[in-house]
Amino acid sequence: MSKVIGRDLSYIFILGLFMTFLTVNSIFNSKAEAVEMSNWDAGQIITDGSFWTTGKMSKTDIQNFLNSKNSTCVSNGDNKCLKDYVEKTSTKSSDAYCSGTFSGSNTDTAASIISKASQACKVNEKVLLTMLQKEQGLVTALWAYYVDPNGVHSNDDSHFKSAMGMGCPDTAACDSKYYGFSNQVYNAARQLNVYRITQSYNYKPYKDNYIQYNPNTSCGGSNIYISNWATAALYTYTPYQPNAAALANPYGTGDNCSAYGNRNFFRIFYDWFGRPNSYYVKGAIANKYNDLGGVNARLADPTSYELPVSGKGVAQTFQGGNIYWRSLTGGTYAVWGAIKSRYSSLGGSGGFLGFPTTDELSAASVTVQVFESGSIYWIKSSGKTFITKGAIRNKYNSKGGTASFLGLPKSEELGADGVGQIFDNGKIFWSQKIGAFITSGGIGNLYNEMGSRTSKLGYPISDEIVGDTYTYQKFEGGQIRWTKTKGAWTVYN
């Protein structure tokens, strides 16, 4: 288990092992957006950009947010509302983990403390607000003081003293040196950077990490591929993942093996600020994605996680195309544009074409991409796409493909009993019992005029043969012969 600095106080609270000071329903009121737990991903609870980017909320924005989330809370006597909270704070100098200075004040509000800690330690203001709610429910608490099991309360500032769960390990009492609201907020933000900068804790990104469901080891856990430093930091701070029971009841409790801290972080952030995570790339697909320029290039943002394809490999979709990885060969290729549209219409890697075996190969007039069982050509002048496959593709490629005298494809395969395909300067015909042969030039023209494969001649059974006195081609029902002076004529069997 990681060295835990922050305790999952929300886990203790929901199980009823900690003093309660408000109901579950009142903790999670005023939802701005209904959480979609289908978007929960244990490997990416929140993106790095949403976690480490500051300046998204000003001090005034934070104050207005606190007011809006708890407008009915009244501070008087021993009751304190976070929106009204004020304390004297001390200056905290910059260091290796917080590059900015936290300037002290005789009258620092909660909003000011959150804002200054965010700026000093470069942790998003929304993250700090979410953690305050996740740990102690302070943002929406209608009262904040200690309540013992008999319902007797006293104003010992318990929930402000340990507002972020900072310095509160699962197996011991909270460390008093971290007591105090500003102390909690600043040191929690700093500690999140300690995890990332020192990289000396158990949970690390870009690899599988075994994460338990509960402090009770008998509840088990699973390997999670952590995709970024933000998620690694959250697991180090609160080292459990929600089990299926916790996820199935996102606003309540699960079972005896459920833990809620990271689930609650995801849910609260989602409710208040929108979805915190996004799709991510890893492994061979990530390498290919980065080679192609990543998010700032043609593929742009991912729009799915890796999708298994019939046990043969994986595919991942992006705004600008897809990347496919074939497990048998380790080949990783991107498909986009008109070729991708045609490929997807035929079932993609799950269709008859199979996985790509090249990236796009582009020439002046055509772009082609090769797949396991066929090739797709995009003709630049017309914007049309055509496929070659099977024996016709093999024949076409044997003559040099687009660089050959045949030129570019002009049709798909035609015919049912056998097939033919039209190219700029000829045709390739195929039948199962005979194979694939080319017709072109004067012989091809006469063959076409006669009705090609539907004529008495039937299918070609040879390519053109240059003889001593004429060039000829054999067909099922005869020959077509050609000379420069006489042109083409037919000789039947």
Image (cartoon, rainbow, N blue to C red):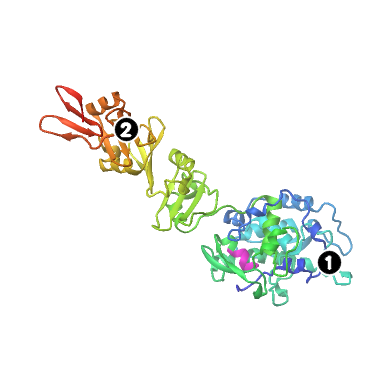
The numbered dot on residue 416 is: none
| Start-end of magenta stretch | 232-238
Which secondary structure dominates the residues rendered in magenta? Answer: helix
- Depth check: give the residue in front, 255 or 229: 255
- Amino acid beneath label 2: Phe
- Depth check: give the residue in front, 478 or 141: 478
Instruction: Please say whether residue 127 is visible from this viewpoint.
Output: yes
Q: Position of residue 230 (x, y in %)?
A: 59, 60
Other residues around mark 1 within 10 Å, as few (<14) / some (14–19) / many (≥20): many
- Amino acid beneath label 1: Tyr
Please state if 469 lies on the left or on the right of 63 as rendered.
left
Q: CA distance from mark 2 to mark 1?
A: 82 Å
The numbered dot on residue 423 is: 2
Q: Position of residue 106 (x, y in %)?
A: 76, 62
Query: Mark 2 vs mark 1: which is more N-terminal?
Result: 1
**Which residue is rendered at x = 70% and y = 64% of the image?**
260
In the rendered image, the quadrant that contains the N terminus is bottom right
Task: Describe the element under mark 1 as helix, strand or loop.
Answer: loop
Q: Position of residue 69 (x, y in %)?
A: 78, 52
Please state if 38 lies on the left or on the right of 82 as rendered.
left
Q: Is 155 part of what is drawn in magenta? A: no
Task: Describe the element under mark 2 as helix, strand or loop.
Answer: strand
Establish if 374 lies above or below 290: above
Q: Give the quadrant of residue 391.
A: top left
Establish if 171 lies above or below 120: below
The numbered dot on residue 145 is: 1
Check the image and name the residue furthest to the front: 493
